[in-house]
Every structure is written in C-alpha cells, then in structure tokens.
Image (cartoon, rainbow, N blue to C red):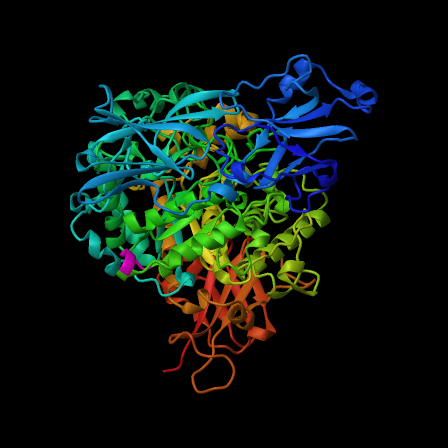
C-alpha cells in the first residue's frame, strides 16, 4: 500500500513537542473510504521516492547508496502524529513524491536504489506509531483477566499484533499447556472467554507482531501487563481472582474503617523502609519470615517493637521501597547464594575483601532495592513464603493490615518511569513485546530513551497513562494502600499525575472499600533528560507542580543542612557539618566565601522550614525582604517552589546516597568525637522534624544507621544494608563499600573506617533513639508545627536571626498562635500560645538576644525538660532581655503555655 502526498501539502507542523525536530516535510494523508479501517499490523517504513521527471537528473547527486538507505530503515525518524498527519524532518525538492509503504511480512528492502518499481528512492525511514495508535485505538474497556460465576475472560490491547494466542497451563512451570486459545481481535483489543476452571491456572501470551528492533515479524512470549498474579519466575501470569474470600485475611473487608485516622495531609510524617532490610537480620523473627511480608505481622519482634515506638511518637506512614515484581532477585529462595558471615565478620573494618565477596554474588542473592520493574501490578514473589499461587497476595494483605493495626499507614514506592526489559526476547520485557514501539519513549531516531536508567516509559501516550492509572487504583482498592511515592516523577507528565490524584481521591468506602480522599501522593520532581524544560509536554517536575497538592522532595534543605550535593565533593560542609565554624580541611575558599556560603545555606534552610513556599516572605542574610522564589540556589534557580505545605517533602537523607550518619562522618573533621557526630546527626534530623511541610525520614536515621559509607547500596546485599533494631550495632566499619560506586572515595573512606573512635556505642544509639522519639512527640504536641495553608504559615512563622548582623550557625524560628475571643490570629493550639525553636549548629554554646522575643512566658518544652540529654536541659531563656542560651549542637524548643 502506498499513499502519495502532493507538494502542496508540505508545511511545518506547529503541534509537535519542542524537543522534536521541526519537520520540513508535513504529509497530510487522505484515505479513500475503502482504506479508513486500515489495520496497522506492521509499522510501515516511510520512504521518499523520486518520480521520473525532468527534475530528477539534477537531484540524483543527492541520493545515497542502497546500503545506506537500507540502514535508514533501522531508524524511525518520521512521526505519525494523527490519523491523517505524518511529520518527517527531511529536505524535499520539486519532483519528489512521498509514499507510505507497508509490508505485512516485513519484507521491505532497498535494491538498486529502489523501494518500489516506479521511481528512484532518495531517502527512507521507519515510522513512529504512538500518535496514530492513540488516535485510532485508544481504549477504555476491560483489560486483563475478568472473573464471573461462569467464565474467565481475557482482554489484551495489542493493535499492531497479527495474531495472539493464550497458552493455558495447570502449573507454574514445566508441562505442556492444557489448552492453546486463539484470541479474536476487535478494534485493536484481543479477547477470549474460557471456562471457570481456568481460575487458578497460569497463562502466557504468544503475540505475533512486527518488532522494529529486529525489523522482523516475531513471536513474542510474555505475561499479561494487567496480570494480578505470577509464577515464581514471572514468566507465567496466574489467574487470580482478587475478590475471592480465600485471599482475604480476617477483617480485610472492614479494614478501611479501622485505619489510623489522618485528619489532614499536613499531619503526615513518613518513615522510608526496605522490606528486606526490616527483618533480614532480626533474630527475633523466625527464619522463614525474615526479609518478607510476614515479618510485619509479628507482635513482639525487635523490628515491630521499634515501629510501635515510632507510631506512638507520631510517625504516620511507612514508605516501602518497591514491592511489585522486579528483576534482580530470584523469586525462588533456594536459588540464592550467600557469603559466610563469619568470614565477613573476621575481616578488618577497612578491608576490601568484604565488598569483593559480596559483589561476587550480588546478582544471585536475595537483595535488591527493586527499581527495575518487570510488572507493576503484582507483589514481588521473593518477599512471599511461596512465590507461586496466591501467597503473595494473602501475605501482602496481612502486612498492610498489621501495619495499619499498629497505627501506621502504608505508602508504596511506584516506578512508572522505566522498565527493566525491552525487545522481543528479553526475559524481563513485557510491554515492548505486546505493542513494540509504543510504551517506551523514543528519541528522534526512533531509539529508546534511557535517561532514567533504562527503557523510559511514555506516559504522554494514552494507553501508557491508562495503565499507570489503572495500576494505582488496583493497588489502592485491592491492597488498601494509603499513599504512593513516585520514583523519578519528573519523567511522568503533570497531567498524568493530576489524573492519578483525581482517580485515587474519588474512591469511596461504599463503592471501593476505602476512602480515597486520605491517599497522599508525592515523588521525585527532578527535571532532566529528554523531558527537561517540558521537552515532551508539561512534566511533573518541582516547578510545574504548585497548585496540584502533590508533594515533591525538597533537595534544597537537604543540601543546605549537610553541604554540597550528592554530586559534589563529599567533604563540602554545610550548616550542621561545620561550614565556617569547624573546618574539615576541604578548600571552601576564603573565610569570607565560607561565611557567604553559610549565610546562603541558612536562607535555604529557613525557607525550607517555611514549607519551601515560593511566596513566603523572609528577611535574608543581607537584610532584604524577599520571597522564597527570589532566593536562588548556587545554580541560579529558585530555592522555593511550593504553593502549599503539603507540596513539600522535607528530608535530609533517603535510601539514595550515604546514610545521614555516614555523610556526617565524612564531612565533619576527623578529630571530633563520635558523641559530637551523634549530636550532629540529631541536629540535622531535628530541622526536618520541626519544619512546616511533610517530614521524611530514612529508616535508621534514628539509630545512627551506617552502610559503611556506601553511597549507593541498591545491590550491596544484606551485609552493607543491615538494620539492627536491638540497638547493639549501627553497622559502621563492615568493610570498604562496593568498588563500583565508591572506589574513587576509598582514600577518604579507609582511614575513617579504620579509626575505632568513629564507631558509636550502644549508649550512643539508645540516646539517639530517645532523642528522635522526643522530636516526634514535640512535633505532635502542637498543631503549630503542622500548619495547613500558605497564608497561615506566612502569618505565624518568623525567623529572627536574619540580616547582616546574624549570628553564625544559629537559626531562630517562632510560631505564633492567637487567642479565642481576641481579634487577629485564630487560636489553633489549646495548650501553647507561642513557640520558639533555636537550632545551634556551632561547636560552642551561643547566646542570642531578640528584642522581638522579650517579656514572653517562654519555658523549655516539658519533653526536653525530662530528656535524657543533659545538654538540652541546660538551655534557658531570660524574659527581660529576650536572651536565649543554647548549648553546642543542640535544638532547644521553648513554649509559652496558655494561662489557665
């Protein structure tokens, strides 16, 4: 089939995203009535052919060889933008005709500079199909497996497939299929209806489809992208009816009525945890439960008792790193490899042997963070007691129930920005086998974009967005999930995120079994790669999200507190790690330059503590009143971007990069004591805990967690990722961290690990736990720490150590409340009418005088009065002078009780 586009239809297209090449050829395709139902079984290459005319002889010199043109078919540089519009960036002169050619058996070739008999081929390319697939085959009907009392029905969206078969198996592996069913196609959807006896069986799709990566018609064997169950290797989908009573733990259907209460998203605080880390090393958990879902269902394990403490103090949500089916960990535990821990324990703390032994088996052990998705909608099999059958679902539901019952809501870490596999043969490829060239984002040559890591997905395509939305609703409804954290959210379109929020918040207890209005979503709003600066449409990056009430991580406050960034020099200091006040030997420039850096860091922290609101007015270090959006980072971009407090996730550490204790140990001077590093660890955490916005804590921050200075422990095994909830060890000094990501820093790391004075004792860990719990209790002792609107924060929050006469290393924040029956501010807190928080990052005691804070009835917070930390108890306030005296590296909270 070929279609001719006349020269009169050539023009520039105004409708393509800015990152696409502006096409010099713009083909308007007018289908005759008999071809309007053209099936797109084969993505047709697009060729530009020269007709035999008087102009041809002058243009032949521009032609390329047949082999070069044949190579051109390896690329897809033309875009089928809509049903009757194709765009291709190619020069076209008079006498050229353009043809759209298709071959159902993928046999188009270039021979003697001809792709067809009636003219010389001057140039050719393949065609990217998502635009027309969205126009012609967008679909909102059922997908996946549907169960009724009489039958099991299968639906698969595959508009470019030539044939689809379902292989039905009785068992998860081995044996011949009990049935092979040919699915029927209607408008791009393949479907079949089978007997009720299929329930509990396994199935595989065989999709016969043209694949651009091989330029051949391939038979692709894959799982169902809408699978709700899997075999142990993920190769077969499991026909699992999630509504079956057999899959529901006792009380499951009533769980929505027993979830921990959350009055406002401003009340949220988040604790991030990896499922395996939680219990893999916990000897109080029976061996068969360690590292899995069921470890959370115990009542008195060390880990569960620790979570109960956190919940009682105020943590509201546990954020679980990826729990869907991911690559990198075999679901069959009997296939895992291990290193003898007695050998690891016998080696010196700065040895390179531990990491060598761990990395030798790292792709064959039971550990991986899980940011390499295979199927989004099925719980990971390696965390279940049995990866086959219904166990994943039952045990995942038990985990959610158990966490809810101890007062913790559950957040899932979702990774919709990329997929682990692609192509027709990769064992982890699913979506790219079913509709090749559609689900994965392509560049201008038609090749897959890999800026996120590998195989970027394209949420700007209708059916990709639909799959994301369906998956979120599935987890919310079928697993009663309370929140979602989006990995690399900036690579997803803003419109998709807004639709996701709407879809989730429309869920109701009556209709769906849960209250969707209590589901909170947030993610990483980084702006980079092909989507940067809205290159593929308006993306969900930090500066595009204001007004959505979707949270994003505030990296500004993290970098200002600690110093530098994860991409800078590891010794660059920040507010808490000694910048200017206790230099570590790193070259920060002149003293004046270091002072300027510290002043900027304090401005960044203060605006972050005001929920990083773009319109919050702050007096900066130069004495100027500026909005948060007018305070700039070192790169010249605004620090603040949020329009309301729940759009800001404040944090100082997460699973990525070094742990908080490790980064403090790197950036502080070698000769300070470990007890001082513990104080710095606590000081950093206190800034996050007492800020407006939503605080986020990495599991182990509160027990001085170390990964032996590993900056990226995603595949470093249990050895480097161990958590010890008995508080006996923080895992410091268990060997040099893995070479791949850390070798360049080994010269800095080795002397620290070798120095026994860096290792905390159990007393240090216990004191840190106690101080962390106190911080949480202080946050939840007053609603003034959790203000709900931008206006309320602007009216009530003030910073006092500002302007050119600022005291180095001290941040002073006040929060004011009103009084019932008096004009002005409304009363929010029945207990305290005024709060002052002083953060002293200096290695010395400081005195700070504020005339604006004179003559108040301020006293140290009762929780700190009874603290086990003797230093904080020595903090004091003198009303007549407005003078606060705060010990070194201490956060002191002063409150004004209401008169009774």
Quadrant location of the N terminus? Answer: top right
Secondary structure, magenta segment, majority class: loop
Q: Is residue 530 above or below residue 877?
A: above
Q: Position of residue 587 (x, y in %)?
A: 67, 38
Residue in front for this viewpoint, 95 or 869: 95
Q: Is residue 5 above or below residue 556?
A: above
- Magenta region: 511-515
Which residue, as the protein is rendered here, is positioned at the far right? 58
Left or right of residue 465: residue 310: left
Q: Position of residue 703 (x, y in %)?
A: 37, 44
Quadrant location of the C terminus? Answer: bottom left
Q: Is residue 252 magenta?
A: no
**Image quadrant assignment for residue 448:** top right
Left or right of residue 374: residue 379: left
Q: How many marks?
A: 0
Residue in front for this viewpoint, 270 or 772: 270
Q: Position of residue 507 (x, y in %)?
A: 34, 58
**Image quadrant assignment for residue 413:** top left
Q: Position of residue 278 (x, y in %)?
A: 31, 40
- Residue at 48% x, 39% y: name it: 656
Task: Judge whether residue 584 can be spotted in this image.
Answer: no
Which residue, as the protein is rendered here, is positioned at the far top? 112
Task: Judge whether residue 732 can be spotted in this image.
Answer: yes
């Amino acid at each position: 089939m070929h279609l001719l586009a006349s020269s009169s239809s050539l023009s520039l297209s105004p409708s393509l995203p800015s990152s696409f090449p502006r096409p010099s050829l713009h083909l308007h395709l007018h289908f005759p009535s008999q071809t309007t139902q053209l099936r797109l079984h084969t993505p047709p290459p697009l060729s530009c052919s020269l007709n035999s005319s008087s102009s041809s002889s002058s243009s032949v010199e521009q032609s390329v060889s047949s082999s070069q043109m044949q190579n051109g078919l390896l690329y897809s540089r033309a875009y089928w933008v809509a049903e009757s519009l194709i765009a291709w960036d190619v020069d076209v002169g008079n006498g050229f005709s353009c043809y759209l050619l298709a071959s159902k058996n993928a046999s188009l070739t270039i021979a003697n500079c001809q792709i067809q008999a009636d003219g010389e081929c001057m140039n050719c390319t393949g065609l990217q199909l998502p635009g027309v697939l969205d126009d012609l085959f967008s679909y909102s009907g059922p997908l996946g497996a549907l169960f009724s009392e009489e039958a099991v029905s299968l639906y698969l969206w595959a508009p470019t497939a030539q044939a689809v078969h379902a292989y039905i198996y009785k068992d998860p592996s081995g044996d011949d299929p009990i049935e092979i069913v040919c699915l029927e196609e209607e408008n791009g959807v393949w479907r079949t209806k089978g007997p009720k006896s299929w329930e509990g069986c396994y199935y595989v799709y065989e999709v016969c489809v043209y694949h651009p990566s091989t330029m051949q018609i391939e038979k692709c064997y894959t799982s169902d992208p809408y699978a709700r169950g899997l075999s142990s290797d993920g190769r077969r989908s499991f026909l699992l009816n999630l509504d079956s009573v057999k899959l529901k733990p006792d009380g499951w259907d009533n769980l929505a009525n027993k979830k921990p209460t959350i009055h406002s998203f401003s009340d949220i605080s988040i604790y991030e945890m990896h499922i395996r880390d939680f219990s893999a090393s916990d000897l109080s958990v029976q061996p068969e439960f360690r590292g899995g879902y069921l470890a959370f269902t115990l009542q008195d394990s060390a880990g569960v008792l620790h979570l109960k403490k956190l919940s009682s103090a105020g943590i509201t949500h546990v954020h679980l790193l990826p729990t869907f089916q991911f690559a990198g960990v075999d679901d069959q535990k009997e296939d895992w490899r291990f290193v003898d821990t007695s050998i690891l324990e016998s080696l010196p703390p700065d040895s390179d042997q531990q990491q060598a032994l761990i990395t030798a088996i790292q792709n064959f052990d039971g550990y991986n963070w899980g940011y390499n998705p295979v199927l989004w909608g099925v719980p990971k099999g390696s965390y279940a007691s049995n990866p086959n059958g219904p166990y994943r679902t039952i045990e995942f539901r038990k985990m959610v129930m158990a966490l809810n019952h101890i007062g913790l809501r559950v957040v899932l870490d979702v990774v919709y920005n990329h997929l682990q596999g692609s192509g027709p043969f990769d064992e982890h490829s699913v979506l790219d086998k079913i509709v090749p060239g559609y689900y994965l984002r392509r560049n201008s040559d038609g090749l897959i974009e890999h800026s996120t890591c590998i195989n970027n997905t394209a949420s700007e395509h209708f059916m990709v967005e639909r799959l994301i939305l369906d998956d979120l609703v599935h987890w919310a409804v079928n697993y009663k999930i309370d929140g979602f954290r989006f990995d690399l959210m900036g690579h997803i379109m803003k419109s998709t995120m807004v639709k996701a929020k709407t879809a989730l918040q429309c869920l109701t207890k009556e209709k769906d079994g849960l209250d969707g209005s209590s589901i909170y979503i947030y993610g990483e709003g980084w702006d980079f790669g092909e989507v940067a600066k809205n290159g593929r449409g308006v993306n969900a990056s930090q500066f595009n999200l204001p007004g959505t009430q979707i949270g994003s991580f505030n990296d500004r406050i993290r970098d200002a507190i600690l110093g530098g960034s994860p991409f800078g020099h590891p010794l660059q200091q920040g507010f808490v790690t000694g910048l200017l006040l206790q230099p570590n030997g790193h070259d920060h420039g002149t003293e004046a330059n270091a002072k300027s850096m510290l002043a900027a860091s304090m401005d960044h922290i203060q605006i972050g503590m005001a929920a990083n609101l773009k319109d919050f007015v702050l007096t900066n270090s130069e004495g100027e009143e500026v909005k948060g959006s007018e305070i700039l980072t070192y790169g010249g971009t605004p620090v603040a971007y949020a329009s309301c407090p729940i759009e800001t996730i404040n944090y100082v550490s997460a699973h990525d990069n070094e742990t908080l204790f490790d980064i403090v140990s790197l950036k502080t001077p070698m000769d300070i004591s470990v007890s001082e590093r513990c104080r710095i660890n606590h000081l950093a955490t206190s800034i996050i805990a007492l800020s407006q916005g939503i605080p986020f804590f990495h599991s182990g921050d509160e027990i001085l967690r170390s990964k032996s200075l590993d900056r990226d422990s995603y595949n470093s095994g249990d050895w480097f990722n161990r958590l010890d909830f008995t508080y006996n060890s923080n895992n410091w000094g268990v060997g040099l961290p893995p070479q791949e990501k850390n070798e360049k820093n080994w010269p800095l790391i080795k002397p620290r690990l070798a120095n026994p004075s860096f290792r905390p004792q159990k007393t240090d860990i216990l004191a840190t736990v106690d101080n962390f719990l106190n911080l949480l209790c202080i946050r939840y002792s007053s609603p003034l720490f959790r203000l709900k609107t931008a206006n309320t924060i602007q009216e009530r929050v003030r910073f006092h150590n500002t302007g050119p006469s600022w005291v180095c290393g001290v941040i002073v924040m006040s929060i004011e409340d009103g009084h019932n029956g008096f004009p002005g501010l409304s009363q929010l807190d029945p207990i305290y009418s005024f709060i002052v928080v002083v953060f002293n990052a200096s290695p010395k005691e400081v005195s700070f005088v504020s005339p604006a804070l004179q003559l108040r009835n301020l006293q140290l917070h009762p929780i700190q009065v009874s603290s086990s930390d003797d230093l904080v108890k020595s903090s004091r306030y003198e009303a007549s002078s407005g003078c606060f005296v705060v010990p070194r590296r201490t956060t002191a909270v002063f409150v004004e009780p209401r008169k009774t």
